[in-house]
Amino acid sequence: MSVVHLHVHSEYSLLDGACKIDRMAARAAELGMPALGLTDHGVMNGAVEHYKACKANGIKPIIGLEAYLVDDRRRADQRVERNHLTLLASTEAGFRNLVELTSAGFLEGFGRGKPGVDTELLDRHADGVIALTGCLQSRFCRRLAEERPADARAHLDELLGVFGPENVYFEIQANGLAEQEKVNEGIVRAARELGRPLVATADVHYLRREDYSNHAALLCVQTKSTLSQPKISARVSPADADAFVRLLRELAECAPSPEDPPPIRSADPDDYYLIALAARERVPLVSGDHHLLELGDRLPIMSPREFLEQLKKARRDSV
């Protein structure tokens, strides 16, 4: 079975991600992965670089972002709840919609240093976009952690209504956190009730075991703390697992149990597989039949000068 990382943060997840895109693509190719995702916090600044790096290494780029979900983007400058939501482009229209989302997040929902998007904005730009329910900081997981199952289900219904049932996947992680283990039970239960597949992700923030300290240092800079007294603990410590890659022979042991939601199988081995891999063993891996983004020569690549000229023209046309 081929495996692909879908929830991945590069250096464009500022003061958080410690992965260089070119090195990630090379490492994924080295391990025989057919594709590699990129889901930076609120931005798609690395999309073109990711596309080029994956192509240079003979693997397929999957482009996305981890959006900041708020109730009302127009109030994002206030102290409001802000949750994570993993989004992936499945078509060219989806890619363009993600560009629209991140741009609108900065232009209409920017507050307290983060670009916020709300359900209204998601609904407007949902075409061609796949949603994963998200990490521990997602709204779905927070509601499960807070033992508010009705509110968790209400949020799920909202996602299903926006993206459509076939485009919502249940994201599950194994990071050694007790809260995650608790939440995982609710994720599996909800996925089983709705007959939707699980997608195991590692929430990648650094490339190799020895890079853990780099990620920890970035978090300390972000939170104005020190390595000896950090305000936020770094993800998945080396004592638990390598945060980026598991050898394929280890992943082969992660077979779903009969009680788990049915995996989506692909009849075409050349399809993109909608698979993420776990940071630790015993998390189910599933493959999907979605053809994920293949932009080819259609990806709009321009120089910084051309981009600025386009912005100037758009401003003149709007006056």
Image: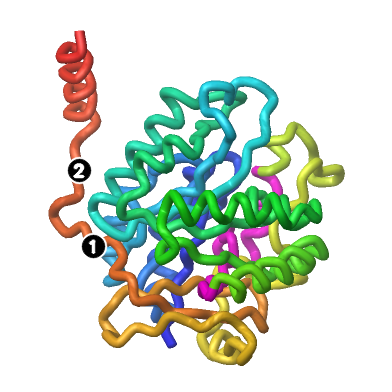
Residue in the foreground of this view, choosing between 128 and 111 = 128
The residues tagged by marks 1 and 2 sit, at their Cα atoms, a distance apart of 15 Å
Q: Amino acid at mark 2?
A: Ile
Write the residue at 50% across / 36% down.
Answer: 118
Q: Is residue 137 left or right of residue 232?
A: left
* Residue 249 place in picture, x, y as percent: 54, 90
Decide if residue 121 is in sight here.
yes
Q: In the rendered view, would you say 261 is above or below 77?
A: below
- The vertical placement of 172 against 227, above or below, is below
Residue 213 in sight: no
Q: Residue at x 55, y 70 (%)?
A: 194
Q: Nearer the viewer, residue 171 or 52?
A: 171
- The quadrant in which the C terminus is found is top left
Q: Earlier in the sequence, mark 1 or mark 2?
A: 1
What element does badge 1 sit on? loop
- Residue sitting at x 43%, y 49%: 162
Kindly identify which residue carries mark 2.
Answer: 301
Q: Which residues are magenta?
A: 195-218
Disc 1 marks which residue?
294
Along the viewing direction, whichever of 168 and 116 lies nearer the viewer = 168
User: Where on the picture, by quarter, is residue 173?
Assistant: bottom right
What amino acid is at disc 1? Glu
- Image quadrant holding the N terminus, namely bottom left
Q: Quick check: is 11 in the magenta stretch?
A: no
Q: Is residue 115 left or right of residue 47?
A: right
